[in-house]
Image (cartoon, helix red, strand yellow):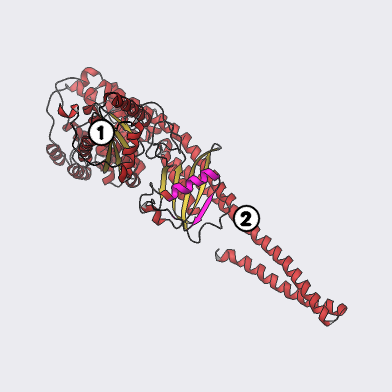
């Protein structure tokens, strides 16, 4: 309670004391005149007590009314601030704003309004089947709170009791995660979306605890959060529609010119890295990535005979090809959400010295986004095979960029780009472009989910293009039945990107998605080699079924995969093998528990025959 809140209370207490003294004097005088001195004193005292009790009741009621008014005003302030900030976000970022930003904003506003140091937003859906509520957003934690047993316990209690839950000095028990040590008190509040219970917001570490927070006010905060999240879900559907347009245009371009297959995705990768070097905000980087994915879309208007020509182009043919930035910018301009990308697409072939096309801009007249795309586009073209020339090495391509800095390219962009490439040389294993374009709605999940939960649709995960969680379990059950009949084993390997949450918070979700896709491509390649099945098993987990293999060989394969992706992501893995009597879900569950660190599920290494795919 601050000074302004204490002042009215002090006035009321002073009035009570003065009134009590006055009543005492008056009561004594009146009683003494009628009853005599002793009886008068007693009667006067009784009058004082009655008067004091009445005045205290009035004072308490007034204080309670002020407290209720203050709480209601706090609720109104929360609702007002939340909606204003969401509106501001949508004005600044437009229809392509990532709905996950709304989840983070809801949590951040709730923790501040409740004067809490930390917060978590959880979904009631168990998308990955691990028995826990899914973590959507976190605020203020030094250590990863995704495995917090304490938070899971209180969130589950909210679900069971359908009300807020408070606790001072909560105990996590022996299985508590490291983040649990940071929690000293907490309150868990249910969130409803369209009258259906959808999640829990947990706020922790408020000075003095949360006991003085009114239940109705806390529930109202949850209702406001649900309304805002519901609106974000609708915007997420709009975002998916726009990004489907991006995917359609990019895939149409690949179909028309096979030499561009994977080129735009590779350019987008380099653009992301340079955007990081220039300290672009995550949303700015994401918009830049979308522009880079569509930078060549104008080639849809160019004849295949010219695009596919095996030799050098004539001057007339070159003039036709040079129209593609104008064509592309006009195409993109037809989609309102993509309109801000128009200038980057239009000017990505300008030269720093003014000798480029289509407008012959020079220096900083060229949009920075276009200068970045120009360098990334040229580098990707130099290291690609073409019918009329061999690809350059990475070192030669970097040297060529440096040679042309100040004439064709922006020197600052070249410096940042070359440093990034030499630190992390490019892969030449190209994935499907469509995988780079799917909507990243809530961290760690895709595939037709609600804002806080997931409903699995189809067999394929739209971000990684691997099989879905549900299809993986179907295949695992079939493998177990086959093993029971044939006596041949199979193994399940679980992979987890251990720093995905940190990457998302530091670099934005586009960077986290790129890391996930990089690992997914390698796991998918391993599945192709061994005749297995690769799937997205959860937010940051991938899974691989390895036919005919025991634990030793599955571990060996997992170690190879970890080594291949080391430059792109921090990954850990665990494996489990089929045993007689196992169902498919038993093997998967053992691999998952081993990944979680249950020593009883980690099998000892031993000798086993190599599966056929390893001998070929």
* Quadrant occupied by the N terminus: bottom right
Q: Which residue is mark 2?
A: 69
* Residue at figure coordinates x 36%, y 41% from the top left: 283
Viewer-closest of 143 and 76: 143
Q: Is 438 included in the stretch rendered in magenta? A: no
Q: Position of residue 271 (x, y in %)?
A: 26, 38
Q: Neighbour class for label 2 at 10 Å: few (<14), some, many (≥20)?
A: few
What is the distance, in whole Å, between disc 2 and disc 1 at their CAs? 58 Å
* Residue at figure coordinates x 13%, y 30% from the top left: 391
* Quadrant occupied by the C terminus: top left
Q: Is residue 527 visible?
A: yes
Residue 388 located left or right of residue 349: left
- In this rendering, is residue 545 above or below 164? above
- In this rendering, is residue 575 above or below 184? above
Q: Is 151 included in the stretch rendered in magenta? A: yes
Earlier in the chain: of badge 2 and badge 1, it is: 2
| Res. 601 image quadrant | top left
Q: Position of residue 138 (x, y in %)?
A: 41, 48
Q: Residue furthest front?
A: 580
Viewer-closest of 363 and 576: 576
Q: How many marks?
A: 2
Segment tinted magenta in the rendering = 150-171
* Residue at figure coordinates x 76%, y 69% from the top left: 50
Assign a secondary structure to mark 2: helix
Q: Which residue is mark 1?
A: 523
Q: Position of residue 448 (x, y in %)?
A: 42, 31
Q: Residue furthest top?
A: 305
Q: Residue furthest bottom?
A: 37
């Amino acid at each position: 309670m601050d000074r302004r809140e204490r002042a009215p209370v002090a006035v009321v207490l002073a009035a009570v004391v003065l009134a009590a003294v006055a009543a005492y004097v008056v009561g004594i005088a009146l009683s003494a005149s009628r009853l005599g001195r002793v009886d008068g004193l007693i009667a006067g005292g009784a009058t004082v007590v009655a008067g004091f009790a009445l005045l205290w009741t009035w004072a308490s009621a007034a204080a309670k009314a002020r407290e209720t008014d203050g709480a209601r005003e706090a609720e109104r302030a929360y609702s007002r601030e939340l909606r204003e900030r969401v509106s501001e976000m949508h004005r600044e970022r437009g229809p392509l704003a990532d709905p996950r930003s709304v989840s983070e904003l809801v949590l951040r506003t709730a923790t501040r309004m409740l004067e809490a140091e930390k917060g978590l937003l959880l979904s009631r859906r168990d998308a990955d089947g691990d028995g826990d509520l899914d973590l959507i957003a976190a605020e203020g934690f030094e250590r990863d709170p995704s495995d917090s047993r304490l938070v899971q316990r209180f969130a589950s209690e909210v679900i069971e009791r359908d009300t807020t839950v408070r606790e001072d000095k909560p105990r996590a028990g022996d299985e508590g995660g490291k983040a649990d040590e940071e929690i000293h008190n907490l309150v868990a509040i249910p969130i409803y979306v369209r009258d259906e219970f959808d999640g829990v917001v947990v706020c922790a570490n408020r000075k003095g605890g949360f006991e003085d927070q009114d239940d109705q006010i806390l529930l109202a905060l949850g209702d406001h959060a649900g309304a805002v999240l519901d609106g974000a879900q609708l915007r997420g559907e709009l975002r998916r529609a726009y990004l489907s347009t991006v995917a359609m245009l990019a895939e149409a371009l690949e179909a028309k010119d096979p030499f561009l297959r994977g080129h735009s995705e590779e350019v987008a990768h380099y653009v992301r890295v340079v955007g990081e070097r220039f300290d672009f905000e995550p949303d700015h980087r994401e918009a830049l990535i979308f522009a880079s994915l569509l930078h060549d879309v104008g080639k849809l208007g160019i004849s295949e005979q010219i695009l596919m020509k095996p030799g050098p182009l004539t001057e007339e043919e070159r003039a036709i090809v040079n129209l593609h930035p104008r064509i592309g910018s006009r195409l993109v301009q037809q989609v309102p959400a993509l309109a801000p990308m128009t200038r980057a697409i239009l000017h990505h072939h300008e030269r720093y010295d003014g000798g480029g096309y289509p407008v012959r801009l020079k220096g900083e007249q060229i949009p920075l986004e276009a200068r970045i795309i120009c360098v990334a586009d040229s580098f990707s073209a130099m290291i690609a095979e073409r019918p009329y020339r061999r690809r350059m090495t990475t070192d030669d391509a970097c040297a060529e960029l440096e040679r042309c800095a100040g004439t064709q390219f922006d020197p600052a962009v070249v410096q940042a780009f070359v440093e990034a490439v030499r630190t992390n040389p490019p892969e030449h294993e190209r994935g499907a472009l469509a995988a780079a374009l799917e909507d990243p709605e809530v961290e760690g999940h895709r595939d037709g989910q609600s804002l806080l939960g997931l409903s699995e649709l189809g067999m394929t995960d739209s971000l990684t293009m691997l099989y879905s969680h549900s299809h993986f379990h179907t295949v695992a059950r079939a493998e177990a039945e086959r093993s029971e009949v044939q006596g041949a084993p199979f193994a399940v390997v679980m992979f987890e990107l251990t720093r995905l949450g940190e990457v998302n918070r530091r670099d934005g979700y586009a960077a986290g998605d790129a890391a996930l896709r990089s690992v997914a491509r390698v796991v998918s390649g391993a599945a192709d080699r061994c005749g297995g099945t690769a799937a997205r098993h959860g937010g940051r987990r991938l899974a691989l079924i390895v036919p005919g293999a025991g634990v030793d060989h599955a571990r060996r394969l997992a170690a190879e995969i970890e080594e291949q992706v080391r430059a792109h992501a921090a990954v850990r893995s665990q494996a489990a093998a089929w045993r007689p009597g196992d169902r498919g879900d038993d093997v998967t569950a053992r691999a998952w528990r081993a990944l979680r660190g249950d020593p009883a599920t980690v099998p000892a290494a031993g000798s086993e025959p190599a599966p056929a795919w390893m001998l070929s």
